[in-house]
Amino acid sequence: MTKEELRSRFPFLENGKIYLNHAATSPMPQTVIDKIQEHIYISSETDIDNYEFFIKQVSSARKKTAELINASSDRIAFTENTSTGLNILARGIDWKAGDRILLNDLEFPSNVYPFLNLKKSGVEIDFVKSQNGVVSAEDIINAITPGTRLVSVSFVQFLTGYRVDLKPIGEFCRQKGIIFAVDGIQGIGAIQLDVEDSKVDFISCGTQKWLMGLKGFSFIYVSKELQGKISPAYLGWLSVENAWDLLNYEMKLRPDAGVFEGGTLNFIGAAAFVGALDLFEAFGVKNVEEEVLRNSSYLRQRLNESGIPTLADGWPGSNSSGIITFRYENSQKVFEDLHKRNIIVSLREGMLRVSPHFYNTFEEIDGFIGALKVQA
């Protein structure tokens, strides 16, 4: 698929909008729209109770998600959002008073509150202090203590866009028997993640950002080894092996990650996610990452040429992502004026955050730079 063919899959582009806000929410490509419309048609006009069809959509979404992160399908479960996924982990471990969890001071709250909530059980929470907007793998490893039982970190930091090197953390945690969890929402869909290579035990990731799925649909990955250590805090009728033997209340739990799904899933969310992943596959997952990094690199270059430093200046390429954030005078007014011009970015912590995806072009980035200069 060429870039032109790819861009033809995004209906909103016909309106002249420059959308550079994928770290917040992605627009729906046509492949997602088609899947949603198919689901609505079946649910409203034809075989309304076609459970088998809906389950096939879930199975397809599970398979494609697993392939995306180099996992097996039985290690994937679907849930509502990233916070719910991290709560499944936080509430499922048999914590002891004095156990320690290591976070950092730049995490999005979804990757903080589920663990802070454990303090009432005697769990201690340690925070790695960032340096110039960066929490590196080395910083995290150096902060691990003998009491550390779990480390959780964002693959890509939501504000700065810093991509942490997961592999050394994963290898260290694996050697020490420490659970390694990752909030994947700002990286997966833009940057490739291999759970086997990175030695990740757990991932929680919403689909509405870089993955172009629906709000309210998320997935978790849980390794087989970690699942053996988790006691599900909530169970439902689909958590057991004999689910369709409805009046046999034998609580024999499923051995796969589906034990965490409990009940009826967001079928339309699963169908939409299949449509999104179909587009990623058609363009090539590796090509997606290359285009994302090419666009963010060009954006940073153009900002620097305009005399605007970014938080990512000086980072190695291996720590770059799709997010470029910078300080700008009168950022609130500039943000609002850009929006009026149909140029969509984010305002976060008083800074402008720009996040182009794989279908965006240099011409669109130039359009953003030109509009920014008009505001100066």
Image (cartoon, rainbow, N blue to C red):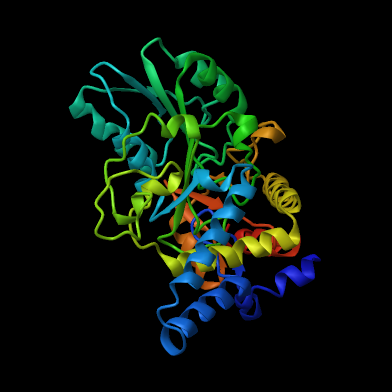
Q: Quadrant of the N terminus?
A: bottom right
Q: Nearer the viewer, residue 52 or 344?
A: 52
Q: How many marks?
A: 0
Q: Nearer the viewer, residue 187 or 197?
A: 197
Q: Nearer the viewer, residue 41 or 24?
A: 41
Q: Is residue 128 left or right of residue 246?
A: right
The quarter of the picture where residue 155 lies is top right
Q: Position of residue 17 (x, y in %)?
A: 60, 73
Q: Is residue 233 left or right of residue 182?
A: left
Which residue lies most toward the top here? Answer: 146
Q: Position of residue 67 (x, y in %)?
A: 64, 49
Q: Position of residue 29 (x, y in %)?
A: 61, 70
Q: Position of residue 61 (x, y in %)?
A: 55, 59
Q: Quadrant of the C terminus?
A: bottom right
Which residue lies most toward the left here? Answer: 120
Which residue lies most toward the bottom here? Answer: 45
- Asked if 5 appears above or below 358 in the picture, the reply is below
- Asked if 26 appears above or below 353 in the picture, the reply is below
- The reply to whether residue 324 is in sight is no
- The reply to whether residue 117 is in sight is yes
Q: Nearer the viewer, residue 246 or 209?
A: 246
Q: Is residue 242 left or right of residue 74?
A: left
Q: Is residue 332 left or right of residue 294?
A: left
Residue located 44% across and 67% down the image: 267
Residue located 40% across and 25% down the image: 150
Residue located 50% across and 24% down the image: 131
